Image: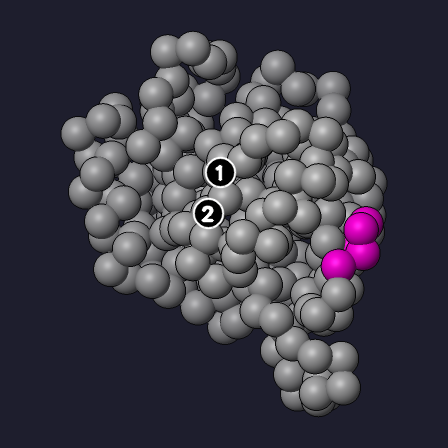
Amino acid sequence: MTQTENFARYPSLRGAVVLVTGGGSGIGAALVEQFGLQDARVAFLDVADEASGRLVEDLRSRCLHAPVFMHCNLLDIPALRAAVAQVEAQLGAVRVLVNNAASDDRHKFADVTPEYWDERMAVNLRHQFFATQAVAPGMAAAGGGSVINMSSIAWMIPSTGLPAYVTAKAGIVGLTRTLARELGEANIRVNCVLPGAIMTERQRRMWMTPDYLAEIMQRQSLKRELLPEEVARLVLFLAADDSAGITNQSFVIDGGWV
């Protein structure tokens, strides 16, 4: 877990209700941690009960407000809506939503079926719209807020070997732009973050071969590994009032790959 003494603190995040999807591991866990260390009131949704429980226990003694974990399958939109309602009932109106949950499972172009395509869109794109739709009324009534959608540089490179994922991540940029226009009058800001090769536990375990790591180092301008907490600190800024004039934008954090 990370230290925070060398990094910014945001008074506007103290006590703010923050909802993170896919918060049990990887970048999502770093988001939960970093918001918690800002004294925000964090809830997160995930299907990984064991990892999520460990995260809550680790942060319970380190954060002013222990994170609240709710089991939720984001493919089930009624369950997602019910989880948002539960967060609002327990903590109050969501002022920051981070649409983080995703799955970058590899798949071959020739093997993709219509059913698999639809499932990938549901896993990586659809829930971002419906989570935003669910929090928007309460966020607007509370005076506004910030929605941060997690995309990827995968569509900018473009990556191969996972075409449905790449398509969904490109779609998130378009979703961000239209929702920023839809929700701006309610003082709801919508921005997008596009990480590059971030060294999560899953990435190290599943894909980070010596050859791939060497390729990353060759392509990045910064010749070092990027960590989940570095993505989280960008999201903190976009969530805080320090970025109050910023919406409808996409921010790349990839060490200078693209």
Tell me the quarter of the image containing the C terminus: top right
Please report whichever mark, 2 or 1, sits nearer to the chain's N-terminal start.
Answer: 2
Report whether 141 appears left or right of 80: right
Q: What span is colored magenta in the figure?
A: 155-159
Residue at 71% over, 84% down: 112
250 and 155: which is toward the camera: 155
Q: Can you identify the residue that label 2 sits on? A: 200
Tell me the quarter of the image containing the N terminus: top left
Above/below status of 136 relative to 79:
above
Residue at 75% over, 70% down: 163
The answer to the question of whether label 2 and label 1 lie on touching residues, with beta carbons closer than 8 A, is yes
Q: Amino acid at mark 2?
A: Thr
Above/below status of 177 relative to 239:
below
70 and 6: which is toward the camera: 6
In the drawing, what numbered circle is on residue 228?
A: 1
Residue 195 position, x and y percent, is 64, 42
Give the SS element for disc 1. Answer: helix
Q: Main secondary structure of the magenta part?
A: loop
Residue 183 position, x and y percent, is 74, 40
In magenta stretch: residue 20: no
Mark 2 and mark 1: Cα distance apart in space: 6 Å
In magenta stretch: residue 157: yes
